[in-house]
Image: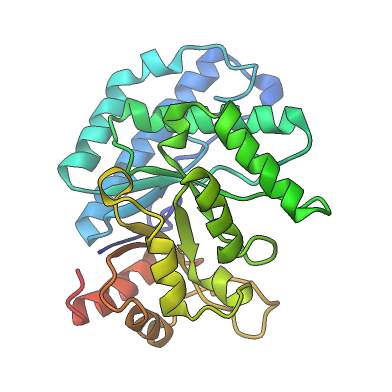
Amino acid sequence: MKIGYPCVNESLDCSSSGTFRLASYSDEKLVQMVEKNLACLRRILEYNLEHGFLFFRMSSGLVPFASHEVCNYNWQEHFKMTFRRLGDFIKRHDMRISMHPDQFVVLNSPDERIVRNSINELIYQGSVMDLMGLDSTAKLQIHAGGVYGDKPAALKRFIHTYHTMLPEAVKARLVVENDDRLYSLRDCLELNAETGIPILFDNFHHECLNHGESMAEALQLAAGTWHPTQDGVLMMDYSSQSPGERKGKHVTSIDTDLFREFIGHLNGLDVDIMLEIKDKEASCIRARQVLEELALV
């Protein structure tokens, strides 16, 4: 079992998603910013290795404006060796990697421009993993999208986009996450039946939106959509409700008793767990201690 946190390390004095204003874009600024972002990513990965965090969600902003029409610079060639070295580090230490495109990536939008831009973003992020030499167990995590007043039609648009517009290289990495308001695990299972796309399970979202499936049952259903050789073991996001806050607000720091209780629902299932908790690596340290007590890492 691998455990990790997304994108930002609160203990380090750098960011792997530095950017600049679109209006001031230049190739020179792009190169300078990507150099800083990739150097910081290397520091984060080294920190994670030192602390036993072998699952990490890389920032979508490693290459600013990479999927925007303003960016014509061949950053792939310029940073080819840097990406390869990062990938070698990841593979050498058996790390698991994912990326989670921003909310503007919506494959079932009725707006063709939004769909086209979404696909361009997925191609960019997948190419980062390709440049690193990572296999298809490194995943691109998206939500099913909007409902637009007609969920069956929205699901059909997603399925149509998947089959007719997505490059095979993106399909190989794509996973869909159940959310807390619109698309439940059951909805994602419908997408899986039509596309084969694995379901990245979110326990907190399932608590907010479900059809009566127990946590243990939901985990088994989601895990059944992953093919071990090409997808790896089930990836999942873990969090819990912030006390006294609106429904769906993530907790600031992990409740280890709740986490230990959740681990009991796995019933021996092998998963890689991404902590979506605000204090990032601080909670990761405490969660790993729980897993060590249970002899799961």
**Residue 153 vertical placement versus 189 (above, below):** above
Scheme by which the image is coloured: rainbow
| Residue at x 51% of width, y 14% of height | 28
Q: Is residue 288 left or right of residue 13?
A: left
Q: Residue at x 56, y 33 (%)?
A: 163
Q: 174 left or right of 131? A: right
Q: Is residue 128 visible to us here? A: yes
For residue 75, what is the image quadrant? top left
Residue 249, image x and y in percent? 63, 72
Placement of the N terminus among the 4 image quadrants: bottom left
Q: Residue furthest front?
A: 193
User: Toward the viewer: 233 or 240?
Assistant: 233
Residue 218 vertical placement versus 19 (above, below) = below
279 vs 292, left or right, is right
Q: For residue 250, which quarter of the picture?
A: bottom right
Residue depicted at 45% across the width and 28% down the height: 168
Residue found at x 19% / y 48%:
94
- Residue 218 in the figure: left or right of residue 267: right
Vertical placement of residue 25 versus 170, above or below: above
Q: Is residue 254 visible?
A: no
User: Could you tell me residue 49's position as x and y percent?
Assistant: 22, 53
| Coordinates of residue 272 in the picture (x, y in percent) | 32, 61
Please state the horizontal and vertical placement of residue 257, each as a whole percent of the image. Answer: 39, 87
Looking at the image, residue 272 lies above or below residue 107: below
